[in-house]
Image: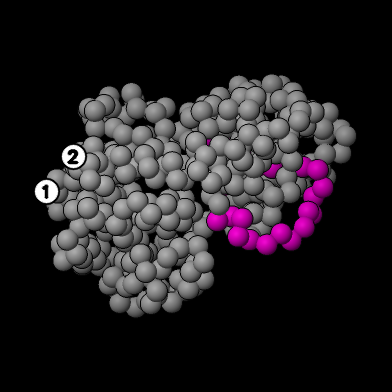
Amino acid sequence: MKILYLTVPSFFDLEISLIRELKKLVDIKVVMIVSPESMHLSAFSIDELEDQCDLIPANKYKGMEKYEDLINLDDWIIANNPNNSLCNCFLLSNKIKKYYQENDFSFFHGTTNCKTSLFLLPFIYRLKNKVLTKHDPIQHNKKSFLYEFFKCRLVHKSYENFIFLSDALTEKFCKHYSIKKESIYYSRLSVYDYFRSFKDSGNNYGNYVLFFGRISEYKGVDVLIDAFMQTKACKDGKRLVIAGRGKIKHSIESLPTNIIVINDYISNDVLSNLIRHSSFVVLPYISATQSGCVMSAYAFNKPILATNVGDLPKSVIDGETGMICNPNDINKLASSIDCMFASNLHNYSTTIKKLYQDKGELSWHKAALDIVNIYKKISNDNSL
């Protein structure tokens, strides 16, 4: 069986490792749709797009050579969309369709509902073996009727089979979109180990707890600031570092000197260094499904203090890989931060390493095995 894996740069951070492990088990090629909107993201960044709207081997695409130590460029194809116009989206979708047919692929694995992929839906609808990975089964923010119809219902109708990275929203998703539970399969993320490839540039902030990622209201950053100012850790001179772009209700200039806000785009090398030298990571989310921040922190075996929302209590095992506290509760978050600083953080780190590295129970190797089993079930092919 040959698998075509269609994706976008938004998921490059996790697919660096996932595709590496899948390639050991199945014959797989990755087509990554790149447009002006996706040139500069957390893990993927290129300076310029090629001029032509075409499928270009990654080993011939300018700018991809810097990733040759992270991925096998021979297994990746860049679907280059220089202006993301509807005309180019349609043209590129036809090229992807032709590539699928001419190379005798027998399974289509999608991860995106970007504009180009929407033009592929009539083709995908007719395929027998297909699956869509849904990173966010239910959107955090309410979308328009057109979004619901075109980017959700038509996509769901075409794919029929879905991989969730969490079971937290299965019931809500199935009810909202009239999807049968039998069509839902489960996989999960493992550690974003590419972060370890960046050099250590030293500790700039001393003993600190770290929040990182794009700052949105549902992530509870303002709650975290209020909580940290109440902690014994704050009074003792320990620091809170908040790294990410977004709006904060607090006046950054008026915050205590041991609350450091880097309110900007955080490059991968800077982020890896921040995680590497933190005491632990805090995710004070008010609502969530899952978070890639967990797997970024676990890449350095860093414990996590997270709130009891979405799938976080499953990926952060209370008392084993970190702590769980109630969401949107300033007092409880403050006491939990102090409790984490007072705990044996090394024990948490040892457990994380055992679970996620090499062929551990929650490693990328195990995640790839789970996905191959999904391919087998959907295609009724046990020869994989």
Residue nearest the viewer, comparing 340 with 34 = 340
Real-space CA distance between mark 2 and mark 1, rounded to the nearest whole angstrom: 17 Å
In this rendering, is residue 76 above or below 357?
below
Residue furthest out toward the left: 126
Q: Is residue 215 visible?
A: no
Please tell me which residue is depicted at 56% across the width and 44% down the height of the picture. 357
Three-letter code for the amino acid on which mark 1 is drawn: Arg
Determine which residue is flagged by label 2: 380
Please tell me which residue is depicted at 42% across the width and 42% down the height of the picture. 367
The total of numbered circles placed on residues is: 2
Please tell me which residue is depicted at 60% across the width and 21% down the height of the picture. 326
Q: Quadrant of residue 89?
A: bottom left
In this rendering, is residue 328 above or below 250?
above
- Asked if residue 16 is among those painted magenta in the image, a careful observer would answer no
Residue furthest out toward the right: 236
Q: Which residues are magenta?
A: 194-221
Residue furthest out toward the front: 383
- Asked if residue 218 is among those painted magenta in the image, a careful observer would answer yes
Q: Nearer the viewer, mark 2 or mark 1?
A: 2
Q: Is residue 206 visible?
A: yes
